[in-house]
Amino acid sequence: MSQIAESQWIWRDGAFIPWADATIHVLSHSVQFGSSAFEGIRAYSTPRGPAIFRLREHLTRLLMSCKIYRTDVPYTIDQLIAASRELIVRNGLESCYLRPMVVRGYGSAGMVPTGAPVEVYLPCWPWGTYLGAGALENGVDACISSWHRVEPNTIPAMAKIAGNYLSGQLIKMEAMANGYAEGIALSPGGMVSEGSGQNVFLVSGGTIVTTPLDGTILGGITRDTIMTLAREAGIPVREAHIPREMLYMADEVFFTGTAAEITPVRSIDRITIGAGKPGPVTSLMQTQYLDIVHGRVDDTHGWLTHCRD
């Protein structure tokens, strides 16, 4: 796992401040109780300069996450889009990872954040392949985690809130400790849910199958992208509850996510998936995705926000 490579500037509540000045108090509500919302967004190098992938959709999800937690954000999506574009240009980055954050600050000692101010940050930094060198080309080895996702209606899985990722940490650390690159969690009912921070897809008989929005997974922006591209390519796509053994029997399995992009899975629990290498459907989806984000084909969906236009 790569360390953060510092950039020069962070946007905080309407102003650009030096990286080292973006600090919060140790007793901020988000540190005490995990009450911060965030997004993970990639900007890619294109022939027209850096372009942010599906920025508006990510920021919409950020504000919806805040709405669920009764957090009023004092900025519009258009203001955050403008700030994100300028931030990347100011930092002189051609490609990077952007992490908008809405943080509950210092002022409340109790669990309810009344009196804790809302602070909005936009950091960005260079970040390469999430699951390691060669992951996109060769695939990764994964396992079924012993940690399950929480029941629906306990915490909202569709809100991208910091506290939700305590579960993901346990899944990821267990997988790595046992020699795997990633873990896959099951739902409380024992069906496939998602990875530590990725959605899961399988390919069987030429059909792409992924888990439904059932209250145990985050509705990924990359997940939606792949479902759209697959349907446009004439590949059948369906959502279904997936028993874990379907993963072992699948022709192909892959992860999707902003950080993971489209990462093939070559084995699960040391059972080889398909031919043990990226399959044709996974490779097609990965190629189409990377061609779009890098500006190698026309952006017919309007998914790229160019920073220098």
Image: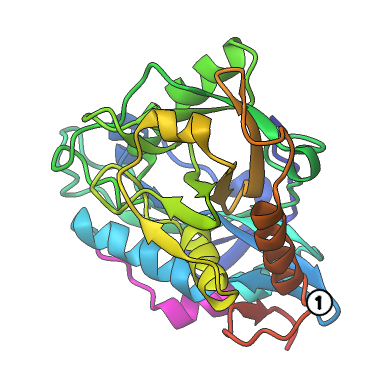
In the rendered image, residue 130, in percent from the top left (x then y), is placed at 68, 41
In the rendered image, residue 88, in percent from the top left (x then y), is placed at 71, 67
Between 213 and 59, the residue placed more toward the observer is 213
Is 236 within the magenta?
no
Relative vertical location of residue 23 with respect to residue 37 in this rendering, above or below:
above
In the rendered image, residue 99, in percent from the top left (x then y), is placed at 55, 54
Is 74 within the magenta?
yes
Q: Which residue is mark 1?
A: 296
Farthest residue, direction front: 205
Q: Name the quadrant of the N terminus.
A: top right
Number of numbered callouts drawn: 1
In the rendered image, residue 23, in percent from the top left (x then y), is placed at 52, 43
Residue in the image at 37% along x and 33% along y = 31
Q: Name the quadrant of the C terminus.
A: bottom right
Query: In screen coordinates, is 153 left or right of 42?
Result: left
User: From this viewpoint, is residue 168 visible?
Assistant: no
Colour style of the rendered protein structure:
rainbow
Residue stretch rendered in magenta on the structure: 72-83
Farthest residue, direction right: 47
Residue in the image at 42% along x and 51% along y = 210
How crowded pointer 1 is (Cα within 10 Å; few <14, some 14-19, many 20+) is rated as few
Assign a secondary structure to mark 1: loop
Occupied quadrant, residue 149 = top left
Query: In screen coordinates, is 160 left or right of 276?
Result: left
User: From this viewpoint, is residue 198 visible?
Assistant: yes
Amino acid type at circle 1 is Arg
Occupied quadrant, residue 87 = bottom right
Residue in the image at 44% along x and 56% along y = 220
